[in-house]
Image (cartoon, grey):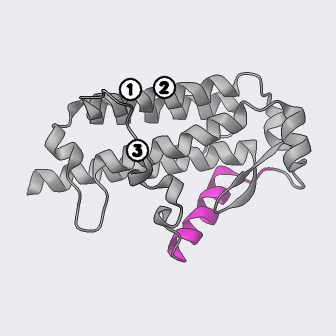
Amino acid sequence: MNAPYSKEDVIAHLREIQQGLRADIDAMPNAEFEREGETTWSPSGYVKHLILSLKPTAKGFNFPPEQLESTFGFAPAPSRTYQEVVVAYESLIEQGLRAELSDRLIPVAYRFPEGVTDEQAYLADTWDESNDRLIAALDPWDEAALDRYQLPHPALGMLTLREMLFFTLHHNTRHWQDVQQSATLSDRA
């Protein structure tokens, strides 16, 4: 991925990841979608984790600017680049950061509504809806506002809205690759 910067770049990359992961989910047999590795989540688990991560991000972008300002203040520094956000996050991973340390973000925290019989299709649709909600929530934010307002990230602390988008792109890509890796390992079994 070329390093995104503008809102337009971010949206294009969000769509690319959304469509790619959706295609992988749709092509995956259910047994493979649910198969956990010895030390990894199942593809289903990764998708649940991504959905659980996207929902609060979209919610944050739906707050009015005045509410973000009064709750979190203005960003004290310019936004970091995509690569700088990636390096900061990967450094935390290397230091032992794991989603399992946050009960809200692990797949077992995901609850299906009553009556769902095809969990794979439901997760694929929910993945699409979550991405669509985030992209729609970006509409009112201009480039300057993405660098001025901030939201808290559970591991990285306060991030500008642009940095939160950079994190989201990297996080979604990282776990899309985990899903693809799970499928590759399953093919070898």
Q: Earlier in the sequence, mark 3 or mark 1?
A: 3
Amino acid identity at mark 1? Asp
Category of crowding for the residue at label 3, using alpha-carbon neighbours closer than 10 angstroms: few (below 14), some (14–19), many (at least 20): many
Q: Which mark is residue 125?
A: 1
- Total number of numbered labels? 3
Q: Name the residue beneath numbered marker 2.
A: 129
Q: Name the residue beneath numbered marker 3.
A: 48
Gap in Å between the C-alphas at discs 2 and 3? 13 Å
Viewer-nearest residue: 79 or 100: 100
> From this viewpoint, which residue is outermost toward the front?
114
Amino acid identity at mark 3? Lys
Name the side, left or right, on which 53 lies relative to 125.
right
Q: Is residue 126 magenta-colored?
A: no
- The residue that appears at 80% across and 28% down in the rendered structure is 142
Does any portion of residue 2 appear in the rendered image? no
Q: Mark 1 and mark 3 in contact (Cβ < 8 Å)?
A: no
- Residue 58 at x, y percent in the picture: 63, 35
Name the magenta segment's main secondary structure. helix
Which corner quadrant of the image does residue 146 belong to?
Answer: top right
Location of the C terminus (image quadrant)? bottom left
- Residue 42 at x, y percent in the picture: 28, 52
Dot 1 lies on which element?
helix
- Position above or below: 94 against 3: below
The magenta region covers 79-95
Category of crowding for the residue at label 1, using alpha-carbon neighbours closer than 10 angstroms: few (below 14), some (14–19), many (at least 20): few
Q: Earlier in the sequence, mark 2 or mark 3?
A: 3
Viewer-nearest residue: 70 or 175: 70
